[in-house]
Image (spheres, helix red, strand yellow):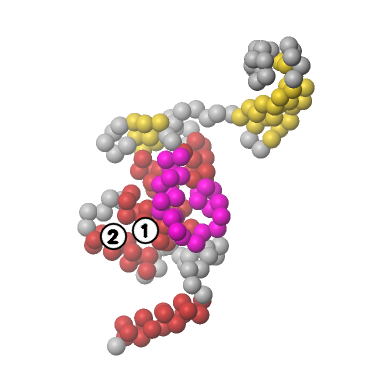
Amino acid sequence: MNCPFCTYDDSKVIDSRDVNDGVRRRRQCLKCGERFTTYERLQPGSLFVIKKDQRREEFDPQKLLGGIRKACGKRPLPAGSVEKLADEVEAELYRTGKSEVPSTVIGDMVMERLKTLDHIAYIRFASVYRDFFDIVALKNLVDGLANGEPVGPPPKNQLPLMPEDTLERATRKTRQTSIK
């Protein structure tokens, strides 16, 4: 370990402590005597994504997070829920123990979680991921959500877009109009 002060290449460990995802070490340079802290974390092996055109590229957690953020943009979601979702998907990918994962598997994992997190984000992600060629296929997906196909109600931790009483009145008006 090179000293950040004098760049000497040797130091002694004064203190070690376990932290959330690694080890924190307090070190002292053997040349200048300055103290500094290092953090050691286990770095998982390389994971490659097999794209639809059979290309392989290294898994990029930031790319995954960016795609999820786009789908969840301007949605009333609890703070940190998007990052948590991305972390869960990444952790599950590494738990599989495989070195190569098809992009379709990653997309399905994200969609499964978005379905329980936010229906609109789910539709947004699906519209890009499933690469709908016509409006009918997208409409079928939306109708499935609207008809209550195995999706369930919006999650309890999702913040409302409008007050409940306003939503109930709007729903009643829509139902009355469709009955006529």
Look at mark 2 in the image and give the residue it sits on.
Answer: 138
User: On the rendered structure, is 40 left or right of 45?
Assistant: right
Point 36% across, 86% down: residue: 176
Circle 2: element type: helix
Going from the N terminus, do you reach mark 1 or mark 2 first? 1
Circle 1: element type: helix
* Picture quarter with the N terminus: top right
Look at mark 1 in the image and give the residue it sits on.
Answer: 123
The Cα atoms of the two marked residues, 1 and 2, are separated by: 8 Å
Amino acid type, mark 2 = Leu
User: On the rendered structure, is 119 left or right of 56?
Assistant: right
Is residue 32 at all visible to an observer of this figure? yes
User: Residue 159, percent across and down?
Assistant: 53, 65
**Along the line of sight, the residue nearer the viewer: 46 or 7:** 7
User: Residue 164, percent across and down?
Assistant: 51, 76
User: On the rendered structure, is 21 left or right of 147?
Assistant: right
Instruction: Tell me the number on the disc at residue 132.
Output: none
- Above-or-below relation of 148 to 21: below
